[in-house]
Image (spheres, grey):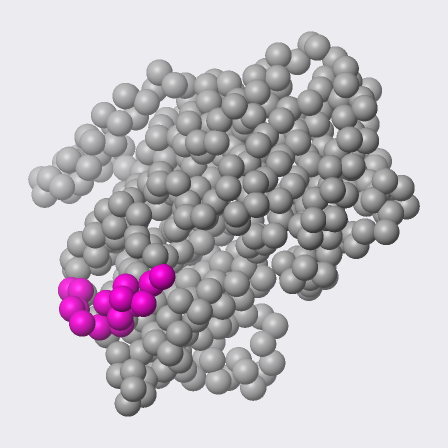
Amino acid sequence: RPRRVGGILDALDERLPFTLTPGQQEVGETIFDEIARPEPMHRLLQGEVGAGKTLVALRAMLAVVDAGGQAVLVAPTEVLAKQHHRSIRALLGKLGEGRSLETPDATDVTLLTGSLSSAERREALNRIVTGEAGIVVGTHALFSDPVEFFDLGLVVIDEQQRFGVEQRAALVGKVANKPHMLVMTATPIPRSIAMTIFGDLSVSELRDRPHGRADVQTVFVNTYTHPAWVDRAWERIREEVQQGRQAFVVCPTINPEKADGERRLVAVTELANQLASGPLQGLRLGMVHGKQATDERDDTMAAFAAGEIDVLVATTVIEVGVDVPNASMMVVMDADRYGVSQLHQLRGRIGRAEHAGLCLLLAPLKGDEPRAVDRLDAVANSHDGFELAEVDLAIRREGDVLGAGQSGASSLKILRLADVDLIERAKDLAERVLADERASSDPLLADLITQAERVAAGEWLEKS
């Protein structure tokens, strides 16, 4: 699908109120080159929260639309899908409202989620199957059987770790000709991990500083030795709210029953009640966690984004969430119970506008947990997600760096930093073998492939 000059992509570039960063331009050109080729693109795009990944993806989608195809953007939650839909429509203006005499190169941006009424769903499905909708934004509802595409040319997966391999394959399998695929993550992945887990994907990184982002001051406080800081944290939240801003409070568990040895971890349900009747009494508090019904959780997140809630007490479900530029402060309770990259991802929820952000990492450490101190100090001292991803790997040294849900494997038990060069050489060798036509008739290789196919993907990764 060669890029067409003078279409909707060029029209968008002309109306953008800002210039693309060098990183966005470079990654964009790489993607344009790949989607012009007959073989499907498989690319992983990594970038900080707010680094401009969605704009890169939108420009790629418009290039496909200009070439006569359709593009789909899949988000992990309905709230995030609706946010993407709104932001894309806002960027495109009349270019996203369908073709007209005034805008002959325009297209329709259609939203498809599980909460649509029957009539809305029928209308959306009709726009998709007829090709009227050049861009489709949705959730897992896009994986369902009734969804048929006119000419699907590009699939964009936002926050790829939230979707299973089977779900991605189900969407790609809806069309005879394999579409291009771009998967995005705001959680930087170490190079060695990316090569091992996403070996079939080319990797691009957006390292430019996000537009209009204020610094987030991050402070680690050991509340075992400085208990008064807890009360001061609530005072600071009040000060932020009095200035018209909002705050997050993050807890590691949902219910207070869970204990960690002799230490009782802070539970979101318990702390929300304590704050509402105590230090934050009179403020508008909301609560979200993973055991709530999806609709309830989405409604609360939407209310927070609309400014109807001052303080959101939550678990890590907010790690991937709506954009709330007015949120300027975050308090993370029992911060030693999170990984480096996860803390950095959480911190990315604040400081998304011109207001300086403050993130307090509170943990009651008795002095015998040096690795926890190393992790928290690393987050407090660096704002570079790619650097922190490598620090995270160095601190853990080996083990389940991504987590079972993200990697598709139970763990990577023998991965070490020393393996990076070996993994890179193995990847290069595998690519050369695949490019060699004689390899398909090699009996030894055929035997090795047969053995590999008998082993589950997770077990094979553990043994590799």
Quadrant where the C terminus sits is top left
Q: Is residue 273 left or right of residue 175?
A: right
Q: Is residue 164 visible?
A: no
Q: Quadrant of residue 73?
A: bottom left
- Magenta stretch containing residue 9, yes or no? yes
Span highlighted in magenta in the image: 2-17
- Magenta stretch containing residue 329, yes or no? no
Q: Is residue 338 left or right of residue 186?
A: right
Q: How many marks?
A: 0
Q: Is residue 2 visible?
A: yes
Location of residue 281 in the rendering, given as x and y in whole percent from the top left corner:
87, 47
Location of residue 301 in the rendering, given as x and y in whole percent from the top left corner:
66, 57
Location of residue 316 in the rendering, given as x and y in whole percent from the top left corner:
64, 42
**Front-most of 331 and 163?**
331
Residue 117 against residue 155 in the figure, above or below = below
| Residue displayed at 69% across by 22% down | 221
| Residue displayed at 44% across by 42% down | 48
Location of residue 431 in the rendering, given as x and y in whole percent from the top left corner:
19, 37
| Residue displayed at 83% across by 44% down | 280
Residue sitting at the far right: 277
